[in-house]
Image (cartoon, grey):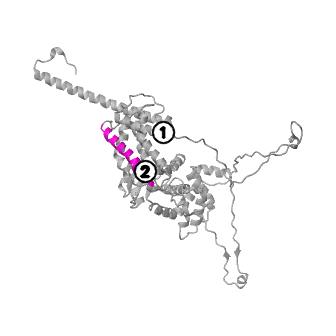
Amino acid sequence: MKIDANSLPNDPEQLKRMLLELQHAMAEKDKELAKKDEIIHSLLERYKIARCKQFGKSSEQNPGGGETFNEAEEILDETDKQLLVEVDNKQTTTVKNKPKRKPLPKALPRKVVTIDLPVTEQVCDCCHNKLHKIGEARSEKLEFVPAHIKVIETVRPKYACKTCEKTGTANHIKIAPMPSTPIPKGIATASLLSQLITAKYQYALPLYRQETMFNDYGISLSRQTMSDWLIRCSELLMPLYGVLKTKLLEQAVIHADETPLNVIQEEKTTSYMWVYCCGEDRLINNKAKNIVLFDYQNSRAAKCPITFLDGYSNYLQVDGYISYEKTEAILAGCMAHARRKFIDAKTAQGKNKTGKADVILSLIGKLYGIEAHIKTKSIIEKYEIRQEKSQPIIDKINNWVTDNKEKIPPKTKLGEAITYWHNQAHKLETYLKDGRINIDNNRAERAVKPFVIGRKNWLFSNTSRGANASAILYSFVETAKANGLLVDSYLQTCLNELAKNPESLEYLLPWNIKQG
């Protein structure tokens, strides 16, 4: 607004009104400028994070690499500085051991090759007397023998009665019954089927590549045929999947997560593969029940976990997705998700800078340090140590979030991290109440990772029937791995036994199987 001093009125009321209008116009302009600054700052933050994710280290331990911009860091108040000092004074240095080559398994077949000196060289270079053996040097190298394929030809002699043939009476031909096979009247054995399953679902090898491999052996085996076989295997394994689900719902703590899946012949563009698991990533003791079950659904609605969990009321550890709140379970939050939000804020605040995000990251790091020390403790000991050491740290984080929530713009990365913690605080504290609960939901995230890797190779499922088959087969592959079993051998055992239609399936549960 331009004002000519010569044209100003002499009336005080008019001057006052003009002054108020001018102040109002300047205030509106200041608001517009502040809004533009906030948008620019938000865009720069997102650019930094996207650039770091694409070109920086994937580890979350040292965020902020490869920065271009250099905004001013957030001002640390005295409380922030004090918290950082308290954490830094209690940090311990971890010394990494130098990696050593593991010896090759003694159970592997060995071929001993002796390389000796020629007889003419077994003399002393000095006195030319004959040398005597004082020892030997041994070394091992690993040789790969390519897999071989063979045909099993089943011969069943037929028997008839000569006397009945002469008298013309009824003549019954007797023949031994065919043994039960996973694919009746098919050429596939359980060993071939288990190989197809492990190749696709454990090693992420799509069927069209397996088709090419079989062609190299001179065997014409189409991907459509193999796909039909895999669906048949999933149907055969379905009763055992049901038993595993029953065992899963009996556990005190279940981890859950979900990931998108593209199914071509489905009404919705994006479907989802849900994962539910318990126990650890790998077998730690023989009494543990490590179960990983995948469940295909064509939506991400709350009805999916509600239907699968079927009234489950114990602890369910998940991320911040709202649909899980509709279940009857007691929700436990994921500290890794909360930490990731502050990692993004750390990345956005600039390289080699110490800001407010570092305060919370230091405190969360201390929580993980406590978990590392109590990993082998009993459930009661974990609970007691968490109450003594972890609870005060959680209280400090809650107080810090409360103090800074109104100070930090909510659309910045730090503001988003603070909002996430504020909304999830009651769930993030649940793990303190029971020693059986983990600090984060990484158990489920690691369980779903093989599916995500496989999806990058085979890209999509054609039908919902195929997606359901994939869910069941992934479940058995990951459950076998978590229980320390050889996946191929376990699947072969299950397919052979289930083809016989046994009355009880308890002996096929992974913790009841003995291998090697």
Q: Residue 46 location in percent, x, y?
A: 41, 35
Task: In the rendered view, tell whether residue 27 sits above or below residue 205.
Answer: above
Q: Name the image quarter holding the C terminus.
A: bottom right
- Which residue carries the number 1 mark? 61
Is 158 in the magenta?
no
Any part of residue 182 in sight:
no
**Residue name at image x 61 percent, y 56 percent:** 195
- Which residue carries the number 2 mark? 385
Q: Nearer the viewer, residue 198 or 505?
A: 505
Q: Residue 278 location in percent, x, y?
A: 47, 56
Seen as rendered, the residue at the extreme bottom is 167
**Residue name at image x 70 percent, y 76 percent:** 159
Task: In the rendered view, tell whether residue 148 sits above or below residue 93.
Answer: below
Mark 2 Cα-neighbour bin, 10 Å: few <14, some 14–19, many ≥20 = some
Helix or strand or loop: what does disc 1 sit on? Answer: loop
Any part of residue 503 in sight:
yes
Give the image quarter of residue 220. bottom right
Give the image quarter of residue 74. top left
User: Which secondary structure is most common in the magenta stretch?
Assistant: helix
Seen as rendered, the residue at the extreme top is 6
Magenta segment = 381-406
Helix or strand or loop: what does disc 2 sit on? Answer: helix
Q: Residue 126 location in percent, x, y?
A: 87, 36
Dot placed on the residue nearer the N-terminal end, 2 or 1: 1
Which is in the foreground here, disc 2 or disc 1?
2
Q: Nearer the viewer, residue 277 or 476?
A: 277
Q: Residue 510 location in percent, x, y?
A: 55, 61
Mark 1 Cα-neighbour bin, 10 Å: few <14, some 14–19, many ≥20 = few
Instruction: Report the amino acid beneath label 2.
Output: Ile
Instruction: Report the amino acid beneath label 1.
Output: Gln
Q: Name the image quarter holding the N terminus.
A: top left
